[in-house]
Image (cartoon, rainbow, N blue to C red):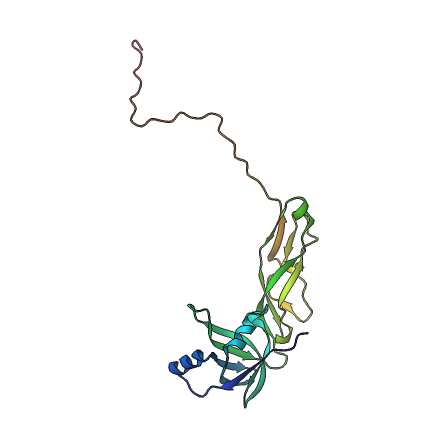
Amino acid sequence: MADKIVVKAQIREERGKNVNRRLRAAGKVPVIVYGGGGESVSAVADLKDLAAILRTESGPNTLFAFEIEGVGSDDVIFQDRQIDPLRGRLVHADLRRFSKGEKIEVTVSIHLVGEPAAVKEDGAMLEQQLREIKVLCEPANIPDSIEVDVSNMKMGDMLHVSDVKVAGNVEIQEAPDTLVAALHTVKEVELEADTEAAEPEVIGAEPEAAPEGE
């Protein structure tokens, strides 16, 4: 198991737009920590440390230790975050701490692993319908992603949420009959060529005169 990430921070004493502007110019991010039965705490942390967590596979679902100087350390995850739409930069974060045994509902990615024989041998198409799934668990048990083995699927098979296997300490929060993936034949549509080409209509052409006597 990987070592837990630790982010160091300081209490944020001053408030206001000008203060926040100076913090961001210095590579810092204003943060609010709350939950877990304790009071909310305003702090400031290094942008590079928080951005590095968001770039991991588990992203905002990553559990990490947030250590505020003079206050202490708490296990937290991102509850909310504000991104500058122009620069794509984190400018504010809400971090949630947890009481012992408390569970949280999060959304994690579904990764299909393996390849059905029909894909290579028969040109079948494996279509993934559900790419993320909601789960309920303690923060320390949040999976980076959920892998679903599709190598044994056969033509026409459909895989539902009820077929997805997770650890015993993780509860799936999606309807069991929700479709995850399906394996089906690729149908080619053949267009029939017209065998009789119609004569083009000439706009403005005079109609032919009927023969005399008719």
Q: How many marks?
A: 0
Q: From the viewer's perspective, tell me whether residue 211 is left or right of residue 58.
A: left
54 above or below 67?
A: above
- Compare residues 158 and 85 and report the one nearer the observer: 85
Residue at image location 62% in from the left, 68% down from the top = 144
183 above or below 29?
A: above
Percent coordinates x, y for residue 157 in the rendering = 66, 50
Residue at image location 61% in from the left, 70% down from the top = 136
Percent coordinates x, y for residue 35 in the rendering = 54, 81
Residue at image location 49% in from the left, 26% down from the top = 195
Percent coordinates x, y for residue 190 in the rendering = 55, 36
Percent coordinates x, y for residue 90 in the rendering = 47, 73
Q: Residue furthest right?
A: 152
Please state, as top left, top right, bottom left or bottom right, where the N terminus lies in the image. bottom right
Please state, as top left, top right, bottom left or bottom right, where the C terminus lies in the image. top left
Q: From the viewer's perspective, tell me whether residue 23 is left or right of residue 191.
A: left
- Compare residues 139 and 71 and report the one nearer the observer: 71
Q: Quadrant of residue 20?
A: bottom left
Q: Quadrant of residue 8?
A: bottom right
